[in-house]
Image (cartoon, coloured by chain):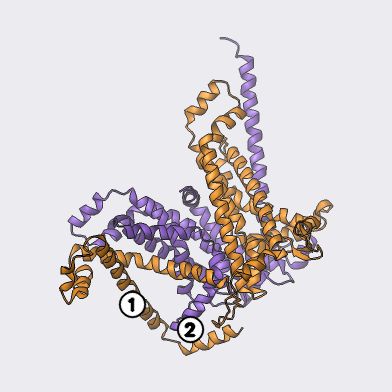
Amino acid sequence: MGCQMEYTLNKNKNKGSVGKRITLFFVTIVIVLFIPLYTLIKMIGKSVNSNFLNFEKYKSKNFILDYIVSSWLSDKDKAQSNRIFVFFLFPALFTFILFVFVPFVQGLYLSMTDWDGLNTGRENFVGLLNYQSIFSDIRFLFSFSRTIVYSILNIVVINLVAFLLALLVTQNLKLKNIYRAGFFMPNLIGGLVLGYIWQFIFNKAFVTFGGAFATSLLTNGNTALFALIGVVTWQYAGYIMMIYIAAIQNIPQDLVEASTIDGANAFQRLRTITLPLVAQAFTVAMFLTLVTSFKQFDTVVSLTQGGPATLMPQWFADLFGVDSNVAVQSTSLVAMNIYNTAFQNYELGIGQSKAIVFFIFLLIISLLQVYFNKRKEIEL
Amino acid sequence: MTQPNLKSRNHFLFKRISKISLEIFAIILLLAFFFPFFLVIVNAAKPLNEIILRPMSFPSDWLSIIDNITEILGRTNVDYFKSFFNSIIITSTSLIAIGVFSGMAAWVLVRTKTKYSFWIFMFFLAGMVIPFQVVMLPLTRLLQTLKNLTGIPFKDTYYGVVMAYIGFGAPLSIFLFHGFIKSIPIDIEEAAIIDGCTKSQVFFKVVLPILKPIFVTLLVLNGMWIWNDYLLPVLIIGLGGDTKTLPLSVANLAGFYDKEWGLILTSVLMAALPILILFFFAQKHIIKGMTSGAIK
């Protein structure tokens, strides 16, 4: 709240001069940082490459000025392409550095501090203490294991449903274009909005069926996770289906005809022709579903808010040798755990170290997945 | 005339029946897929007590959807028109900026064959594997620091959000453009230079039009992401911000414990409708864009 107030105060103070400040900011960045840096790198590169020992060149007093004029300001082709190189690269590279690279590097440091979100710049360096504490934080471990279970189930279910849908709509049906567009449609709507729709369906609509649905699926930890998988499958299967459709349509038709003439039935055709030839699409689809499953956030926020809270399962408590008398959030996946650590508990340092553990894990898993799938592709 | 072969006739009949049953199965599946949409539309036109009593039935009075809509338009924490306008501004500006800036960057990276351009390209590629969660906490801090240093508020402003989207969207876009530009023969550009174009004219008048197909792919991919994004806006804009987008408005309305489902479902409908209408008209481009973007 303190930040907010300071913010509004400053906003009023600087009214009217923001545009000027922005221009100034960018001009300063270009002049002060970018051009000298680039020139310096080029000069170093040059001297290292060829004429490191050629002192003739350095005899001229205005060497640096000459260099800048000849490679930046003159009409020569080289100067022109240098200018173009910098000015064309600048917008993308600058925003990328400012919004991705700098926070990433800063994050590596902040994950080793007791940063609490006040941004006073007075946080203390605590070394690897945060990492130590998150690996003994049973709730984080639980959330992580839930995410892994969720992701595995999700990848299997989405890919299975998507592949079957793709097989269905490539069967030369009359309304196949309508089916394709229809199955794809849930994907257009954002995860947050979808979550609210389904929260309504589970909590208000399905309960009128009675029977197994009499109490909402979202009130039990395990069924809530399955409900989440169902919702995400509904959302995402149509998109993955499109990838499979593209792959299935790329299968040469004469191959299918030849196998039919040879007497292969539908199942044999599927196993020996379709599956090997869409193997590449499997790699892509697995990768996409893997990454989106692990990063799942929006739908959880709106569908379950991470809940319902349950007691920790006995087997999980036994596995880590802790008391099972701990309340845990049963659908609070890692992305949400990070968010809550930061913005509910105000332990941003710990949240950041969780994020980095998450990042490294995701990187390793996705690299392994692509590596093994590629090997499988060759085998098939 | 010979009798038609009985076996082949049976076979033909079997094929026909299986095809029809497959068609029926697909239709049922499609209806099941549409069921949630049906529930949203039906319940958006009901007052709260009717929703609780009969969530599955058709509304007794379709016109109560108008009551719900006017109620939503009157809510100050939703601010529908403003957040709709914000969403349009942010999405369209980001899309054009990402497209043009990444195109420019990718072009000079392909056409300047030095080791710098190789390493800068690799630097961008590395950005593709970084999930937003790793960057989000330091980013909020960085924006605050930047404001303290320069006096420019990046939070809750259009340019701040757009710049963030350029930064996060650039790696994938540059990657796709890079692959595409490599396949464009350089002769065209050389011919343009001989005809008297300057280098920047070569890009904007010759190369950019050639990039159109991949540009459309990126419009779709990035557009779907930015229009529906929640995490980045909630951090940079905030739920109560002046420049809040549609997902934030829906979250504002639905985030309370006491849920007014009639209003929530109406707002969901109003948030989803623009993109569904767009899909209706540009279906081919959208599907093609999303698929080809993924495969590359």
- Residue B222, image x and y in percent? 48, 59
Give the drawing colour for chain A: orange
- Distance from label 2 to label 1 (Cα)? 19 Å
Check residue B148 in the rendering and tell me which mark sits there, or answer none: 2
- Viewer-closest of A123 and A97: A123
Chain letter of the residue beneath label 2 in the structure image: B
Same chain assignment for discs 2 and 1: no
Residue depicted at 64% across the width and 61% down the height = A299
Quarter the C terminus of chain A occupies: top right
- Viewer-closest of B285 and A313: A313
- Viewer-closest of A190 and A103: A103
Give the drawing colour for chain B: purple
Q: Is residue B4 left or right of residue B179?
A: right
Q: How many marks?
A: 2
Q: Identify the secondary structure beneath mark 2.
A: helix
Quarter the N terminus of chain A occupies: bottom right
